[in-house]
Image: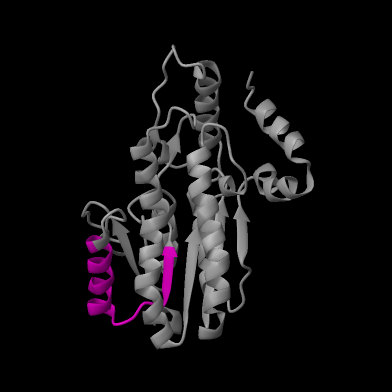
């Protein structure tokens, strides 16, 4: 057993999808505590109950890990929820729910774990955002907004924690073949909506792109490398080639031209 096996990882959203793939790869060398909203059993790593929309649940899970392991060396904020719909028609309650899960819950968890890492004088925080955070995607504007917020917060956090020997990293995945669509919040298709045709076609393309995405194990392996690395980059964009080009194109192309590329991609009227 190497020294890494003594290190403790707290990983949110480990019951399925990308989180489960990350947990499986890390569990080979680390003590992994994964979180799930519903209590389930796992043979590969330890699962604890946590609901990112409930402040007490977050605090309880952190304390549970501390009581069992005595420390937290790596925090991976992976859990998130998707949402689709036009800006005009998306219910504000749904917007709040997604921000609670994708941003505010993550921020509370960081606030709970950071003092632990400062006391340890070391740690690593990895926030999973999305390539969608680099631009406002049509009918995914709310999702893009949450992930952009994660990116900006991660940049600030990295600068703030550098002097405490706490490494902060942003991982921005593109499309991966997972069951993300099953938990997605979406504005239902309505034939009377002025957005019906564009939204219907975009939804199909979103699902098709997920189906054609990379395997979750790709992200699992990459995350393991980032966790074990002594030196890391601030940002890792992980996805298909054209998706990884997005940050470059957003920066280099005129805004209206990039917008046209996006509209043409989704065959919007």
- Look at 36% across and 51% down and name the residue there: 100
Q: How many marks?
A: 0
Magenta-highlighted residues: 56-76
Query: Is 62 a magenta residue?
Result: yes
**Residue 27 visible in the displayed image:** no
Quarter of the rendering containing residue 60:
bottom left
Q: Quadrant of the C terminus?
A: top right
Instruction: Name the foreground residue: 268 vs 12.
Output: 268
Q: Is residue 110 magenta?
A: no
In this rendering, is residue 139 above or below 145? above
Q: Is residue 226 above or below residue 20?
A: below
Q: Percent from the top left, x then y, of residue 207?
A: 49, 31
Percent position of residue 233, x then y: 63, 69
Residue shown at 46% from the left, 16% from the top: 193
Q: Main secondary structure of the magenta part?
A: helix
The quarter of the displayed image where residue 1 is located: bottom left
Q: Residue at x 44, y 80 (%)?
A: 4
Residue 138: % across, % down:
57, 32
């Amino acid at each position: 057993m190497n020294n890494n096996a003594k290190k403790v990882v707290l990983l949110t959203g480990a019951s399925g999808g990308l989180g489960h793939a990350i947990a499986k790869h890390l569990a080979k060398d680390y003590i992994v505590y994964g979180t799930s909203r519903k209590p389930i059993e796992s043979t590969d790593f330890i699962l604890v109950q946590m609901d990112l929309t409930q402040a007490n649940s977050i605090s309880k899970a952190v304390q549970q890990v501390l009581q069992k392991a005595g420390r937290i060396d790596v925090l991976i904020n992976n859990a998130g929820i998707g949402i689709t719909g036009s800006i005009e028609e998306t219910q504000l309650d749904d917007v709040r729910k997604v921000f609670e899960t994708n941003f505010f819950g993550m921020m509370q968890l960081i606030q709970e774990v950071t003092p632990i890492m400062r006391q340890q004088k070391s740690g690593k925080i990895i926030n999973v955002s999305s390539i969608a955070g680099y631009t406002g995607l049509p009918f995914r504007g709310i999702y893009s907004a949450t992930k952009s917020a994660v990116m900006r917060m991660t940049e600030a956090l990295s600068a703030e924690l550098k002097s405490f020997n706490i490494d902060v990293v942003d991982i921005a995945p593109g499309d991966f073949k997972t069951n993300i669509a099953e938990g997605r919040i979406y504005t239902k298709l309505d034939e009377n909506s002025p957005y019906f045709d564009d939204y219907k076609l975009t939804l199909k393309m979103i699902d098709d792109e997920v189906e054609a995405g990379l395997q979750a194990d790709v992200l699992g392996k990459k995350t393991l490398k980032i966790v074990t690395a002594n030196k890391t980059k601030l940002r890792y964009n992980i996805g298909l080639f054209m998706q990884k080009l997005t940050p470059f194109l957003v920066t280099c192309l005129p805004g209206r031209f990039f917008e046209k590329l996006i509209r043409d991609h989704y065959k919007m009227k």
